[in-house]
Image: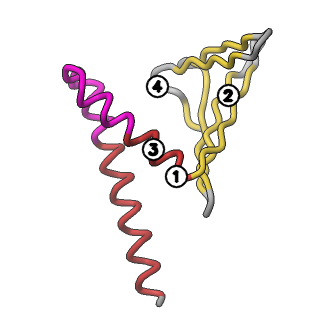
Amino acid sequence: MKPITDKAEVSIDFPEKVYMGSFGKASGFEVKADPDEVLLKLMRHGEQRREVTMHLHYYLLADILSEMAEAMAAMPPIDESHRAPLSEAAQALAAALKTKGRAKQSKK
């Protein structure tokens, strides 16, 4: 489990119930990938323990990333302290996708 360096807030709305939770620096996260999906888990330990797990299939994840790109392109640039790590993470994802593609091609 890796520590959360910033924060996340989660809200799930049902017709008669709302579940809300926040995950900050005392919380952690985990990401796992398998052939069909990515699993994202947020965990907060201690007295107010909570856990959120999301399973995102790759087409949905691709749609989310595309929408994020469009939303961010439509707004003024974010500050450098946030922009640099986002850019580095996006480049690392792109490199990992290229590497995996080359590995599959070379096995043929």
The label on residue 4 is none
Residue that badge 4 annotates = 5
**Is 74 within the magenta?**
yes
Q: Which mark sits nearer the N-terminus, 2 or 4?
A: 4
> In the rendering, at what x and y percent does residue 99 appear?
38, 68
Magenta stretch contains residue 16? no
Q: Quadrant of residue 19?
A: top right
- Which structural element holds mark 1? helix
Q: Earlier in the sequence, mark 3 or mark 2?
A: 2
How far separated are the C-alphas under marks 1 and 2?
A: 25 Å
- What amino acid is found at the position of numbered circle 1 in the picture? Tyr
Q: Nearer the viewer, mark 3 or mark 2?
A: 3
Real-space Cα separation, disc 4 to disc 1, in angstroms:
27 Å
The amino acid type, in three-letter code, at marker 4 is: Thr
Q: Residues within 10 Å of mark 2 (few under 14, many from 20)?
A: many
The answer to whether the residue labelled 3 contacts the one labelled 1, judged by CB atoms less than 8 Å apart, is yes
* Mark pair 3, 4: CA separation: 25 Å
- Disc number for residue 43: 2
**Apparent side of residue 19 relative to residue 92 in the rendered image (left or right):** right
Q: CA distance from mark 3 to mark 1?
A: 6 Å
The residue shown at (35%, 52%) is 92
Q: Residue at x 76, y 13 (%)?
A: 15
Magenta-colored span: 67-87
**Quadrant of the rendering where the N terminus is positioned:** top right
Q: Along the horizontal axis of the image, is 41 left or right of 71? A: right
Q: Which residue is mark 3?
A: 63
Which of the two marks, 3 or 4, is nearer to us in this view?
A: 3
Residue that extends furthest to the front in the rendered view of this protein: 15
